[in-house]
Amino acid sequence: MSQQGIVGRVMQLARANVNAVIDSAEDPQKMLDQLVRDYSAHISAAEQAIAQTIANLRMIEEDRKEEAKAAQQWGRKAQAASKKADELRGAGSANEADTFDDLARVALERQMTAESDVVTVQHTIDAQNESIGKLKDGLAQMKIKLHDLTRKRDNLVARSRGARARERVQHALKSVDIMDPSSEVGRFEEKVRIEEARVRGHEEIEASSLDAQFAGLADAENKAEIESRLKALKSGRAAAGKTATRAKASLH
């Protein structure tokens, strides 16, 4: 695709109403996938076109500098030849003076050609700069649209996956009847009930056993020891308080 073709395609995609395209699509996800591919491909092409155009522009700018330098050099040569002609004519050498005037004319002609080339090259540079500006603007807009398209596609994919997951869950729930003892849930609940009954049976046996009775006795002894120690702590604090009171009284 030519540079002008790339510029036109980039600007067309940059101005495209992608929302309308998506809304009118029979399969929005497929359309989003296609748009993401199109924009990605044209962004890559636009970046390459910009890089190549800038490279060409730099070469043309160098050519313009060379033409401008050549115009200045031919101007200096024309001036030198004209000056020499005037000196020879003043010395009475008219024929030699005419020769140098002819050289000055040649130099002036080449100066004009170089100046014309500078103007032509400048037009080309201006056109290239305009193309680069359009490409950069279109590229920036395309990248924004690509970001939006990618986000919309990802959201749509996530919603689609979520819908399929909910559908699978609903299908699984429909296949399980919690009121049916033969269902998985019913069998699981029955297992839980059996285990709970077995635990209660063991608890009753342990409560009536001799070990359980001794354990109750040990608990009673522990409680008595705790109460005794608590009483001692309280008595100790009370004695300490009386001592402190007497010490303060003796100081006064």
Image (cartoon, rainbow, N blue to C red):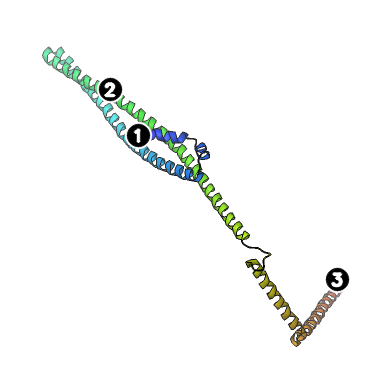
Quadrant showing the N terminus: top left
Is residue 132 in view from this perspective? no
Q: Secondary structure at mark 1?
A: helix
- At label 3, counting other C-alpha atoms closer than 10 Å, the crowd grade (few under 14, some 14-19, many 20 or more) is few
Q: Which residue is mark 2?
A: 116
- Whole-angstrom CA distance, mark 3 to mark 1, is 105 Å
Q: In the rendered structure, which amino acid carries the disc numbered 3?
A: Lys
Q: Which numbered disc covers residue 187?
A: none
Q: Which residue is mark 3?
A: 248
- At label 2, counting other C-alpha atoms closer than 10 Å, the crowd grade (few under 14, some 14-19, many 20 or more) is some
43 to the left or right of 80 = right
Q: Is residue 158 above or below residue 129?
A: below
Q: Is residue 87 above or below residue 132?
A: above
Give percent across and percent down for residue 148: 51, 42
Q: Are marks 2 and 1 in contact (CB under 8 Å)?
A: no
- Looking at marks 3 and 1 on the same chain, the residue that comes earlier in the sequence is marked by 1
Quadrant showing the C terminus: bottom right
Q: Nearer the viewer, mark 3 or mark 1?
A: 1
Q: Are marks 3 and 2 in contact (CB under 8 Å)?
A: no
